[in-house]
Image (cartoon, rainbow, N blue to C red):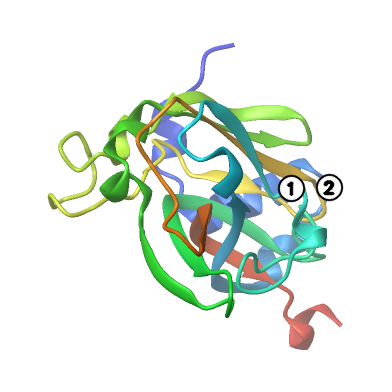
Amino acid sequence: MAINSGLFNNLTPNAKIAMVGNKIGNSGLKNNQGSTQEVYDYIDVTSTIGSKQTLRFFESVNTKSFPLTNIQQNQLGVGEALSIQWVAFSRIEEVIATGSVTQQTALLATVSGLALSQFSVLLDNSRIIKLNSLTRANTQFNPKGGTFNNYLWYPDTDLTLPPQISFTAELTIPANSDTAPVGSKVYYGIHLMGTGAILNLKTNV
């Protein structure tokens, strides 16, 4: 069946959240509080840095805590949803002795060769983004960045994460030149950001 891209392009992120809620039998989602929503996760790559590997974000968030993630399970809570409008890939360094995070940079700004990494998002084991490269997040090829200093990855349609359905993100990276400073750990992270819905107790209780 063909996708009517014009129809989806005319939908606002809030309308897409409401439409997805209706499709999964959660019509009350449209009554929840509109919000700015973000979920993120970081994976320690120190021991495998520079090698070809596949990272599975959000899969083990239940074993992590702040500042490496802001969720405790790989699904949104009751009454929550996220329409993904921007994806940020970043790199942080942490001093092993103190646990201090000393820097955060855009992943491609630090390791430009990772633009050829392949990125997928899975919703309940179904791929909603399949094997896209990070090339569009390279500032020279960023079609929606509007500036040569923008390393955000913009999907062509806002993909919605509904409540209480598991999701993961996969990033397969090629061999590269990245290294970890002596005495520090390196983590790669992903941030999924956009318009969201959160539970509104005044209207939902």
Q: Residue furthest front?
A: 182
Residue located at (56% from left, 67% from top): 37
Marks 1 and 2: CB-CB under 8 Å? yes
Residue occupied by mark 1? 22
Residue 164 numbered tag: none
Q: Nearer the viewer, residue 20 or 148?
A: 148
Q: Nearer the viewer, residue 56 or 129?
A: 56
The x and y percentages for residue 118 are 48, 26
User: Which amino acid, mark 1?
Assistant: Asn
Residue 47 higher or lower than 92, as above or below: above
Is 138 above or below relative to 127?
Answer: below
Identify the residue at image location x=60%, y=44%. 47
Is residue 162 visible to us here?
yes
The N terminus, quarter of image: top right
Farthest right residue in view? 205
The amino acid at mark 2 is: Gly
Q: Quadrant of residue 73?
A: bottom right
What is the number of the mark on residue 25?
Answer: 2
Query: Residue 79, position in %: x, y?
Result: 77, 66
Give neighbour class at mark 1: few <14, some 14-19, many 20+ (Cα, 10 Å). some
Q: Is residue 169 above or below residue 99?
A: above
